[in-house]
Amino acid sequence: MLRVVSWNINGIRRPLQGVCEEPSNCTAMAMGRVLDKLDADIVCLQETKVTRDVLTEPLAIIEGYNSYFSFSRNRSGYSGVATFCKDSATPVAAEEGLSGLLATHNGDVGCYGNMDEFTQEELRALDSEGRALLTQHKIRTSEGKEKTLTLINVYCPHADPGKPERLAFKMRFYRLLQTRAEALLAAGSHVIILGDLNTAHRPIDHWDAVNLECFEDDPGRKWMDSLLSNPGCQAESHVGPFIDSYRCFQPKQEGAFTCWSVVSGARPLNYGCRLDYVLGDRTLVIDTFQASFLLPEVMGSDHCPVGAVLSVSSVPAKQCPPLCTRFLPEFAGTQLKILRFLVRLEQDPVFRQSALQLSDQTQVQMRQNKARVRSARPRPSQAGSSRGQKNLRSYFQPSSSHPQASPNLELPSLGMTPKTQEEEVMAKVVEEQAKASEAKDEKELRTSFWKSVLGGPSPMPLCGGHGEPCVMRTVKKPGPNLGRHFYMCARPRGPPTDPASRCNFFLWSRPS
């Protein structure tokens, strides 16, 4: 059996947090535990959010696996895909990108199809975000026949409603993906497209499809209609080259979602959509697919893993393709260090002798210059004879202009009668009480002032649906209300018919 799993990991370092208590070697142990938990021969990850300059060896090289990465070339911490293959499923070829422009012509997959409809600049842009990675494997069927299987690990672009150019970019990426997949099929290879396609295909794949305008007219859904055969693994009105493997086994399963909004806390009530797929060519799915599944219990991302089980065995290659991360110079021990460029060079004897002579001449000249400076300075007797330079001690001697007071000098009497001991005690008590009262008043005044300033936020209003304290949110959408605060129900988002889900309470916050 061959088990393949796909997971939009939302940052390859994010789910590793909290897996290990020991900071040392934590990354390697945690990544190994993630792969062990997924328990697959081939694990395809999307949205790794790492570039080559921040990829570490413990994260990329895991014992028992060989890994392959595709990085974004435009932005750091953005996009990116990775494929981890067990050593028992080592691919015979691996390639980054769909267009072939990133191919090294050594261990590549090949089979690009007719790409005349794309310009070179367009192909370069489509492959510059690290959204596709191909691995080609040899498999053996139950009849003992060896065949070729190509896995296309993809993270398709998201179409931002406020950026129409991203929708065009997404549709061109879809077109390039289909062109490459059909070219591989035409060359005789079986093909599996798996990853985050960023489109919920059918209304059953989206919880709120009824309230979405023109759901069926979405360009991404129309593209999937042309790519896929109708669910049920039966040939019906439309026969596309690929089959949605999950709907093949679970054609009417509702609530089968793979992505939930983290901001609205929609996962506890399963208020999400299905964006992650394992698509196989029709012959492969009908003949070899034994199961297709979701793993919603696996946490660590806003997506959950999806996968499939095939009744074939992998025939591992004897050597990993050149794209394997263990061959990268920084991990293979062949990267040049800066110390190689700072090695001390042996000097020629003649050059060394001339340098010593030049140094001696420089020292003699410096001594002569210092002697000239000393001779040109004025002598202390000449400089201070006319003014009578003072000694430092003269500033610490008593001045004669202020006569000292005689110790026997008596002060004149002011005619005040001396106080008795009891009067002095009473005066001190009254003075201390006055000071204490004044200090208390000052403390109370200061306390009341800071209480008025630092009184804290006002209590949260109660939502109308549940009578529970609300949460404050901030408008981030560009427009006249950008930056304004408002209150809403604190419960997670869910179906409107579920009383445990968030109510429709909304209240603008008054500016302070």
Image (spheres, rainbow, N blue to C red):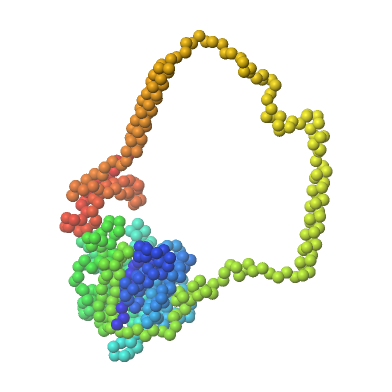
Lateral position of residue 76 relative to residue 374, left or right? left
Task: Give the total of numbered labels.
Answer: 0
The residue at the far top in this view is 415
Quarter of the rendering occupied by the C terminus: top left
Could you say which quadrant of the image residue 114 lies in?
bottom left
* Residue 66 drawn above or below residue 370: below
| Residue found 22% across the figure and 45% down from its top | 462
> Is 215 placed left or right of 350 in the picture?
left
Q: Which residue is pictured at 61% across the width and 70% down the height? A: 340
Residue positioned 78% across, 63% down in the render: 356
Q: Is residue 454 above or below residue 206?
A: above
Along the viewing direction, whichever of 212 and 249 lies nearer the viewer: 249
Relative depth, front residue between 57 and 257: 57
Residue occupying the point 27% across, 47% down: 487
Q: Residue furthest bottom?
A: 144
- In the picture, which quadrant includes the N terminus? bottom left
| Residue 131 appears anywhere in the view | no
> Would you identify the image quadrant in which residue 146 lies?
bottom left
**Image location of residue 260, percent across then percent down:** 28, 62
Viewer-proximal residue among 401 and 309 = 401
> Residue 455: where, in percent of width, then height?
32, 38
Instruction: Answer whether residue 450 is visible to the viewer in this image.
Output: yes
x then y, percent, for residue 149: 35, 82
Examine the image and state in which quarter residue 304 appears: bottom left
Q: Residue 327's x, y, as percent?
A: 48, 76
User: In the visual, does 138 lie left or right of 287?
Assistant: right
